[in-house]
Image (spheres, rainbow, N blue to C red):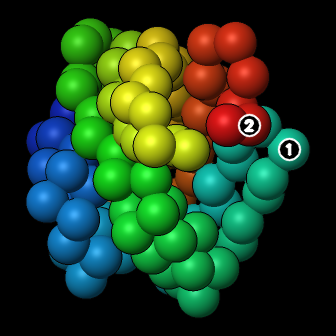
Amino acid sequence: MTDPVSALEAHVEAFNDRDLAALMAGFTDDATWITGTTTVRGSAELADLFEGALRGLLPTLTLDNVIASGDQAAAQLTETLTADGAEHTFAIAGFYRFRDGRISAAKIYREGSAEI
């Protein structure tokens, strides 16, 4: 079984590589992702969310700190993305639940606003 820190590191690596297949492999089929006013559930909705973000915003994540216990992890991350032709950097807090070494739920908070 993959520990939460390793699973989260793999998630960040796949995200930064813009490898949608690897990113999706890190989620359970029924995973829930909440950020700002957006809630997505299940593989199809997650794939749509991440495909659009990876292509449109060219984001990268840096995993700054992680605290993990059992099947949960809390992480402080830095996100850099491009919107309207300008680069933006945001502090992010993410709270994750894992099942069988994969993300089953996440709630993401972006400093300031989750909307770009």
Above or below — where is 106 with respect to 113?
Answer: below
**Residue 44, image x, y percentages:** 59, 88
Looking at this rendering, what residue extends furthest in the right direction? Answer: 37
The residue that disc 1 covers is 37
Image-based side of 86 in relation to 32, left or right: left
- Amino acid on which disc 2 is placed: Glu
- Amino acid on which disc 1 is placed: Thr
Whether label 2 touches label 1, CB < 8 Å? yes
Above or below — where is 59 with respect to 64?
Answer: below
Residue at image point 73% right, 22% down: 113
Earlier in the chain: of badge 2 and badge 1, it is 1
| Residue 115 circle label | 2
Residue at image point 17% right, 41% down: 9
Q: Is residue 73 visible?
A: no
Above or below — where is 86 with respect to 2?
Answer: above
Dot 2 surroundings within 10 Å: few (below 14), some, or many (20 or more)?
Answer: few
Q: Is residue 86 visible?
A: yes
Front residue of this view, candidates 109 and 60: 60
**Quadrant in which residue 14 is drawn:** bottom left
Residue at image point 22% right, 26% down: 62
**Residue 6, image x, y percentages:** 14, 42
Secondary structure under the numbered disc 1 in the rendered image: loop
Quadrant containing the N terminus in the rendered view:
bottom left
